[in-house]
Image: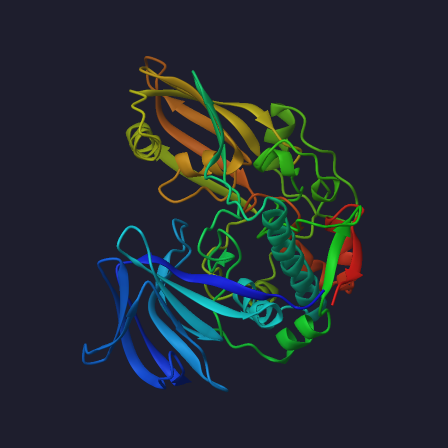
Amino acid sequence: MEEPIIKVGVCDSYPEVKGTLNGFFSPNGLRLTGPFVVRPSGDDAVFCDEHGREILKGKEIRLVAERGATFTLHAVTIGVNFHWEQKKEQTFQGDLTFLATADGRITAINELPLEMYLESVVSSEMNNEAPLEFLKAHAVASRSWLLAMLERRENAGGKVNEKPKGAECDGEIIRWYDREDHELFDVCADDHCQRYQGITNRIDASIFEAVRGTRGVLLTYNGRICDARYHKACGGLTENYTTCWDQENIPCLSHVSDSARPYAPIRSEEEAENWILSSPDVYCNLTDPNLLAKILPATDRPTRDFFRWKVEYGNRELTDIIREKSGIDFGILRNLVPLERGPSGRISRLLIEGTQAKIVIGKELEIRRWLSKSHLYSSAFIVRCLNDSNGLPTRFIFYGAGWGHGVGLCQIGAAAMAARGLTWQEILSHYFNGAKLVKRY
């Protein structure tokens, strides 16, 4: 197996893309450098210089980087639809392609070798100052997820999964979102796939060592590349793959305790309440601000209540959010009832009951989307209601645990393990049940 070349969708369907070529790029025998803007024109993309003069035009415009050249894109949206969404200027290595999309917009794609891509992913997902053994574990997990996703697409004959997936019937909407559903490129640059912010963040010696020291190493299970999912903080118990995605049982993506001593999985509402309202001794229950600052990238540092969290809504506020997200008018919200939970306490089926509608929704991410203007931190929550004299809720109080879907590697827990002296091999063995490490290239 040779090191693959990866196509990353950095700007997906933008009205225009502005940036700067830092060094020379060679399209169609030209040598271009400096500021540019790319706009749609009919079915084509038009590449213009800083003065608006047309340089290139076509459905696809490919700029090949000369030695050492980079490019900067302005106003790139990161954290799309999450609570940290923002626009940033970002700089990238590799080649750059612009595509005119069917909706009359522009998509910018960065093409580069997989290992160079991983250097950016690890430095975008986590801080360069995080423990080296954790960064190595993350590099292997990120590499494994990417190649497993590409392998699934290849086995499907290059077909792209529809999004969202799931089923709808009277009174029930079950949806989940796959990560291999991009048609124009392999992966996007945001949390939907893996964070990829080019060389915008400083990539120091520890990142290079983490990626190069594990070059070509993959997690495998029964001879197949492990679909190595990861998340920010599990809340003390990781989750089963089936709670968040389809019903395929994947043993290497099954529940474990985020601790040296095992904790029992959640099996009832009483156990969920006791767990979520507790503060167990687990790896991701990390309160040391100095270690957190070394682990979390700047984007995530303002989020401090990730292990146990609380969110409150008035009835009308939450009803309006749900109506906006779902398109359904529930009337006055009466109740939120968990029907199924995974072993981490994350809800996979939730009954939403109002005076005009009653619907069961799932899975994990769809629940988080419907109950927040962006996303709830996780679906591991309990709800307490404050009622009026007629017994109708006036206020909903959510008490929750963890940040993210909870499947696979817990980033903060894994970093805490490394800080305690565990190796990258031990960290991966802990989170991915029965998986083996194999060097493929």
Total numbered circles: 0
Residue 389: % across, % down:
32, 14
| Of residues 179 and 133, the one drawn nearer to the viewer in this rendering | 179
Task: Tell me: residue 56, above or below residue 418.
Answer: below
Task: Locate residue 121, reporting x and y percent.
Answer: 55, 65
Residue most toward the front? 29
Instruction: Give above or below for 283 relative to 320.
Output: below
Can you give x and y, in whole percent of width and height, for residue 310 in the image?
A: 47, 40
Does residue 286 appear anywhere in the picture? no
**Does residue 319 appear in this view?**
yes
**Where is the N terminus found, in terms of image quarters?**
bottom right
Residue 70, image x, y percentages: 44, 80
Q: Residue at x 46, y 74 (%)?
A: 95
The color scheme shown is rainbow
Q: Is residue 169 left or right of residue 58?
A: right
Picture layout, residue 307 above or below residue 216: above
Return the residue nearer the eye: 178 or 385.
178
The front one of 425 and 183 is 183
Quarter of image, res 118: bottom right
Which quarter of the image is occupied by the C terminus?
bottom right
45 or 327, which lies in front? 45
| Left or right for 368, reference 144 | left
Residue at x-position 36% and y-position 34%: 313
